[in-house]
Image: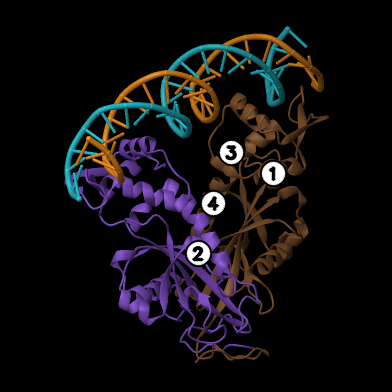
Chain colours: A brown, B purple, C cyan, D orange
Amino acid sequence: MNGRILNKKMDFYANHTRILVAVDSIIFGFNENDTELKVLLLKRKFEPAKGEWSLMGGFVRPEESLDEAAQRIVLQLTGLDNVYMEQLYSFGDPDRDPGGRIISVSYVSLIKINEYDRELAKHHGAFWIPLSELPKLIFDHNDMVSKALRKLRIRARTQPIGFELLPEKFTIPQLQRLYEAIYQAPFDKRNFRRKVLTMGLLDKLDEKEKETSKKGAYYYKFNATKYEELLQGGFNFEL
Amino acid sequence: MNGRILNKKMDFYANHTRILVAVDSIIFGFNENDTELKVLLLKRKFEPAKGEWSLMGGFVRPEESLDEAAQRIVLQLTGLDNVYMEQLYSFGDPDRDPGGRIISVSYVSLIKINEYDRELAKHHGAFWIPLSELPKLIFDHNDMVSKALRKLRIRARTQPIGFELLPEKFTIPQLQRLYEAIYQAPFDKRNFRRKVLTMGLLDKLDEKEKETSKKGAYYYKFNATKYEELLQGGFNFEL
DNA sequence: CCAAAAGTGTTCATCGTACACCCATGT
DNA sequence: ACATGGGTGTACGATGAACACTTTTGG
């Protein structure tokens, strides 16, 4: 029988097989002037499947929770702490990894590409790959990415998580480009602007972004406090 | 270091700690004339927490997938095979179970109360408990039930899973009572009937159910084939 | 002065919601 | 005959979708 209890707890559950548990992270990123969503992928540095494309992952340690493991892994790769993260799904086919029986708990993270540590990522052999150019990944990692994208699309409609992918100050056109990237579909800018502004969650700043146009677009800030307040009153974010 | 590889695969992942992985099932049930949704709970027969209320669970075996483990567990308890089942969430706090470090992958199942094996369930010490009388459960099982209910409510609006809780033939008032049980809110019967029927997914039978009223209510059947067809055309179930 | 992106209103169809009475029948 | 649950239609407001022109300003 595999596995032996070495910790101090009483051994109520002896005679059951222990299994390796990993966490794999689908890390989505966006740059405020991008037009496409990107995934952070890496070239695997060890066997099996060395040299192939994969998601960032690692094994769950005995003393940490799943969430902690996921945060640790994203921190290792990007230098970013406290990123938006959500558990996605657990993959447990006994043959999913040819290297052994591993159950993988997958997580989706959203990060602002500009804020991550390029050196750290490069050191791990990580690259931002646009979703349209997603390569074949190891094992079931392509399934993970599809599932993550599906979940992101559903979530982004009903919760204000899009802002996790943008800097604190952003313009309405930038926000629209983000949503167009997430849904890979164009939106009408009049309808989009109205919908976003009538929710009353964006504070307009006096400052303009002048890189992308001569006229310049006003910056806005997401007002998280107001969002919490509205939630109390049964408000539903809906985009 | 915990764990040793005993199978024939190469040992690529030595030096990582293996963990006990369990599957816990939130089994929702409904009776066509119920007015409330029920959960199948059991009195725990072993330590730790012997005698307390808990969900049905079991450890994942080396050769089975997570889905298989979940199906096996529900089969053991109810005698039902091929029930509707969906993975919910994985709980992995290192202290969630005082008996040892266990990661639990939870599943939601929907079953028709009339079709399960009462003897089998009784033998396991299982009882149907209405949601309104949900007791304190062991560990994080109450969290699991809340999460399951939240997910059920979301799913039932956008996918025709309600029919998993009803017999093949059911009346519109029965269907309405089910939805009222799921959402714990009353619906307008004229609007409900119209919405349900205009989707075109229900076939009306020539037969009436005469138990609950003198007039009798027509039976309907969910037409899964038609549902598949409509899905191709981009149809969205929405209730 | 012109190119390029930002910003702005109205119309129409659709959908959700509210609402009250008749029907069939077993007792 | 009456009580009980089944079955039906309409009107109104809200919401989402389509659609084109003006504004600003750097070059």
In contact (CB < 8 Å): disc 3 and disc 2: no
Q: Locate residue B90 relative to residue A199 in the image: left or right.
A: left
* The C terminus of chain A sits in image quarter: top right
Look at the numbered disc 4 and give the secondary structure of its residue: helix
- Amino acid type shown at disc 4: Lys
Disc 2/disc 4 C-alpha distance (Å): 33 Å
Number of the front mark, 3 or 4: 3
When the figure is inspected, residue A20 is found, relative to residue A110, above or below; the finding is below
Identity of the residue drawn at 45% across and 53% down: B182
- Residue B111 versus residue B235 in the image, above or below: below
Looking at the image, can residue B160 be seen? no
Residue at image location 68% in from the left, 66% down from the top: A73
Q: Is residue A98 above or below residue A219?
A: below
Q: Amino acid at mark 1?
A: Phe
Residue holding disc 2: B133
Q: Chain of mark 2?
A: B
Residue B200 seen anywhere in this rendered image of the structure:
yes
